[in-house]
Structures are given as C-alpha cells and as structure tokens.
Amino acid sequence: MKHKLANSLVALPRMTKRLVSSGFDLSMSLICTFLTLKFDAQNTESLFTDQSVIIAILIGALQIGALWSSGTYQTVARFLSLRSLAKSIYYLLTVDALVFVVFTLYGLGNISHQVGLGQPALFFCLFFISRICMAVLLSDFNKNTSFNNPKTKIALIYGAGDAGRQLAMALLQSKDTEVVGFLDDDPSMQGAIIQSLKVHPTQSIQSLIKQREITHVLLALPSANRSTKSEIIKNISAFGVKVLTLPTLSELAEGKITFNDLKEVQIEDLLAREIALPNEILLNKNIRNQVVLVTGAGGSIGSELCRQILKRNPTKIVLIEVSEAALYLIDSELNDFVKRTKSDCSIVSRLCNVKDDQMIDHIISKEIPDTIYHAAAYKHVPLVEDNICEGIINNVLGTLNCLNSSIKHGVKQFILVSTDKAVRPTNVMGASKRIAEMILQANAHLQPSTKISMVRFGNVLGSSGSVVPRFRQQIASGGPITLTHEEITRYFMTIPEATQLVIQAGALGGSGEVFLLDMGEPIKIIDLAKKMVELSGLKVKEPKVKHRLKGEGEGEGEGEGEGEGEGDIEIKITGLRPGEKLFEELLIGDNPIPTAHPDIFMGWESFLPIESLMSLLEELITNCKNNDSKKAYSLVYEITKPRNITSESNVIAVNPTLNSRP
C-alpha cells in the first residue's frame, strides 16, 4: 500500500505535484485559522463570518506565497535537503511574524488576538510534520527508484568530509547504487549520523563488507597524497570489492561533485612515490616563444610531449609521424586546444618516416626549430626481435638523420627519448637505442651549435607497450593473465610525469649527458597483475594443486588428482621471451650524479669516438638494408658490448660534471 501510494505520487506531472502540494498547505492554513478562531466563537454561525473568511484567505495567501517564493514547491520532495527545508521555514517565519504583529499586538476588527500566535504556531507544526511524513513515505523510493528492481551496487563512502557528503547527496539520484554508510579514520567523526548515514571507523570495513554485502567502496579523498591513497586502496581491494575514486582537488575546483565524477582506480594510484612539483623555469626554457619539433608525435610519449609543450606557449609545434591515423588524432586534439584557449601557437603536421633523410632535412630546413624532441622509435621488444633489420634502421638511422640535419641547420637543442632497455641491452630494441645514445654522445663534443642530451626512463603506465592495457583486456575477457616470469620486475611512471621530466632534463643538459629519471622502486609484474584483478572486484584464481588419493580399504594410495582453488582470474606463466630481462636498470655504472631537479640524475658513461662508431654504423646499416639480420645482429653486439676504458684507447670516458655546459 505504501509503495503504491509513493509510486502514484512520484508519477504525477511536475506542475500537478506543485499544485497538489500548495493546495494541501493552503487547506492546512485555512483549517489552522478556523481552529484558532473556534476557541472564542460561541457557535458555528459566529465562526464563519465574512470577515473571518477573508482573514483566513488572506493569511493562507501570505503563507503559501512565502513558501512559493522560497522554492518549496519547486524542490523535488523526495530529494528535500536540510538547506531547502531551512529556507522554507525562514520565509514562513517571516510571514508569521507579520501575522503576529498585526493580530496580537495591534488587532484587526473583531478577530481574536489569539489568531496572531495560535495560527502561525499550529500551521508551522503541521507544515513541518507533513514534510517529515512525506520524507518517510518516499524514503524507500529514494533507496530504490523501482521497487521491483533492487539496486545492484551497495556502497560505502570512504571519507566523511565535504567531498563525501556531496557524493552521498549526488548518489540519492542513482538508480543502481545504494550508499549504506561512511568510513572515516577521524575519531571525532565516528558514530556521527550524516544525511541519515552512520560514520563507521575504518577498522570495521571487513565486518561491514560481510554484514551489508558491500560491492563498492567509493574514495572521497581528493586532498590525500599519493602514498596515503595507495595504502588505503591496497587495504580495501584485498576484501574483494570494487574501488572507485573521485578526482583530485584541482580537478574538482570548477564544479560540484556528481556521480559521473567517480572513476575506476588507476594503477598509478598505487604508486606510493610522491611526484615532485615541476620546475616551471626548466619546463619553459626550451619551449616558450620558440619553435619545437617532435618526432613520433602520435605515439604514447610523443603525443603527451606535444600536449605538455603546447601548454608552455610555443610559437609553433611541428609534428612528425609516420602513421596517418595517429597524426590525425594528435593534430585534431592540439588544434582543438588552440581554438578553445585562443592560443597563438600554430600546429604543423608532417607525414614522414625518420628513415627518410631527405624529407627530414627538408622539414627541419623549412621550419628551423629551436628544440627537437626525438621520440620516434620502434619499442616493442618481441616485434623488433622478429624484425631486426627494420628495427635497427628505424631506431639508429632515424636518429642519425634527425641529428645530422639538426646540426646542419643550427637547431639549438636536441633531446633523445631513450629507455632503460639501453643499459646492458639483451635485446635488439634496447641495443638499437643504446647505439642511438652513442651517436649523440660522439657528436656532442664535436660541434658547438647544437646542445645534445638524452633521457632514459622505464615503463610508462598506459603506453602502447605497457603491460597494463594488456592486463586490463585479459581481465575484461575473463582471463587468463599471461606473464612471462614470476620474478620479473619493472620501473613504472605515468606518461604526464615522464614527459614533464623529459622536458626538464633536456633543459639541464647540452654536452651529451645521459639523464636518468627517478622512477622509485621497481614493481614485480605479478604483484601488479594481482592488484589489477583485485581493483576490478575479482579474485586471483589459485593455481592447481596436486593431492594424494585415498585407496579403497587401505589408507592413502599412490594415485594423484588435481584440484583448483577458488578465484576468478588465472595468472598463467608463459616463460621469458627472447631478449627479455628479469630486471631493468637505468645506469651502466653505479654513480648517478644529482642535478638541480630532485627526480633527475646524470650518468657517467663511456662511448666510441665518432670515427670508430661511424665505420661500424656504415657496415651495420648496409647489412640491414640488405636484410642480413645475422651480420646486423653481430655488429649490434660489437658496437654495444661492454668496454674497459682503461685498456681500450678508442673508448672515450665522459664525466658530465666536467663536460657540462653552463
């Protein structure tokens, strides 16, 4: 009966509901007036006089007018908040004060003075009680828009601050999510009731999840630092619930929180390392009011470099990309940003392969960039291992073409985006990037015009070569997650963080330095996979185990059977791929040198002089063009093999602290 009545009320047209509500209040006002007059009336005839009827209608009109002006009838009844109720009461008390003054203090005709005090008090009580009854009547409707379709998400909000309270209000309108309480580690908040929801201590999360069958925990901690949030997420995800989070304070600055602001917890939220604030002087040094060229502009790193560069107000950005689809996407995005922000920066997009020396030289000679970020490279280890010659030509010859043209046309700054796989490489991709580094090192000391440097870092989360997108896809399809080795570890960093540090590192150097980015502690990939499964609200499937079978009539037999543990997603070990390392490094030596930026270091490394290097490179490129992968492979090893700088006269040792330019 209650549900049917609530459904019928909610189903009425908006204007009809307003008229019904105001008509109900007007009826209550008239009744309150005549009830008050009845105390002095000797009979019914003396109660309903022309004067009393006019006074009753006048008071009713004033009270309903006040409530209408306060927005009482425009407010959706089932979402009535304390603020809107307080506003209605304020307007009503203002009119009631006028009625009190007119009738009680001054009097009006033969109307009893009791009307000035009794009628407002009685109407106020009835108005307040009616709103409470309406809230109770529609309470189930708030919890479940359709009584026949129970909500599928039962949630706790972690954080009872302003963000948590706003989120709870927003979720009143959710059709599939019911919030059953708050979690907060502030003892002064615990036990409090906020918007009819109790604030529980964080220690009780496990029992609450079991008792209330919680499916989601919603993090409303926009001001929490990364390490705090990481620890909270790790603790919560272990209970098999899905974790959603709100954006940061800076992302929320322009508007209120809504349900749509909730997003999946990203793996980067689990990186406990705090990000150092970028140095704006370094970010702007090689960009502001300058022409900047980016190769590989459509890739994961290249496209983010373009975004970060555009924010620093260059006069022009030149994009070089071999993929038409990738170039179209980043070109459209940058031009949209220029229009939206009314920037004066021009975007020049060029379809070009860095292997084409003539086209590269034409572009650089025409655009005359001040700074070049060379991010174009083949970087997928297995693919390059299967396409040795093409990988070497692209990564080595492409770098040589870009650098030679930069020096020829007086480009001020040339920065190579390198990789940790260039350190003691065990695969062709890493070796080709190490050769690219050696090309830069050998040329840096031969000419004064172009400042040359390179930046090494490890895996970036979400890039096309990262394991994270692949793991997400495998989890979405029900598994298994494929992993090459249980002990494999990697460094990880977010793409925006990595590109900002690349820009800042490039502004620090200019004499062939190898810059290293502080990527925190390495992460075991199997731990990353397990955490991604838990963040999806699932459990890792336990591996199959063998157990002994009992024979008939005689204790245990020798037979074996297989059983499988509980869980949702299996992790399958496939074995290391050719050239794959268990552990990655960022430095060949053991002596990183601090710089002006806390997250950027310089490396002390040796390289071949230009004459020796070019002789080997000519032979290497010739073999690659002839598609002789065996000879190319052996030459790659010859060029990148470890060398003893004390016993080989053709090896140059570089100490960045002695050779860096001011």
Image (cartoon, grey):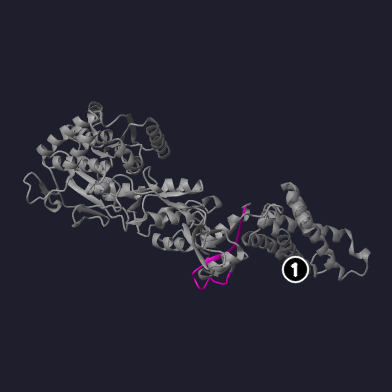
Q: Does 655 appear in magenta?
A: no
Q: How many marks?
A: 1
Q: Tag 1, which secondary structure?
A: helix
Q: Which residue is drawn at 41% across and 37% down?
A: 333
Q: Quadrant of the N terminus?
A: bottom right
- The amino acid type found where label 1 is placed reads Ala
Residue sitting nearer the eye, 456 or 42: 456
Is residue 380 visible in the rendered image? The answer is no
Image height of 512 relative to 180, above or below = above
Image height of 183 relative to 661, above or below = below
Residue sitting nearer the eye, 50 or 372: 372
Is residue 184 visible in the rendered image? The answer is yes
Residue 55: image location, x then y, percent: 81, 60
Magenta extent: 176-192
The residue that mark 1 highlights is 121
Image height of 521 relative to 659, above or below = below
Q: Which residue is drawn at 12% across and 43% down?
A: 608
Residue 473: image location, x then y, percent: 47, 45
Residue 446: image location, x then y, percent: 11, 39
Q: Does 190 appear in magenta?
A: yes
Q: Which residue is drawn at 61% across and 64% down?
A: 212
Label 1 crowding class (10 Å Cα cut-off): few <14, some 14-19, many 20+? Answer: some
Residue sitting nearer the eye, 171 or 354: 354
Residue at the farthest front position = 553
Would you identify the image quadrant in which residue 111 lies? bottom right
Residue 445: image location, x then y, percent: 11, 42
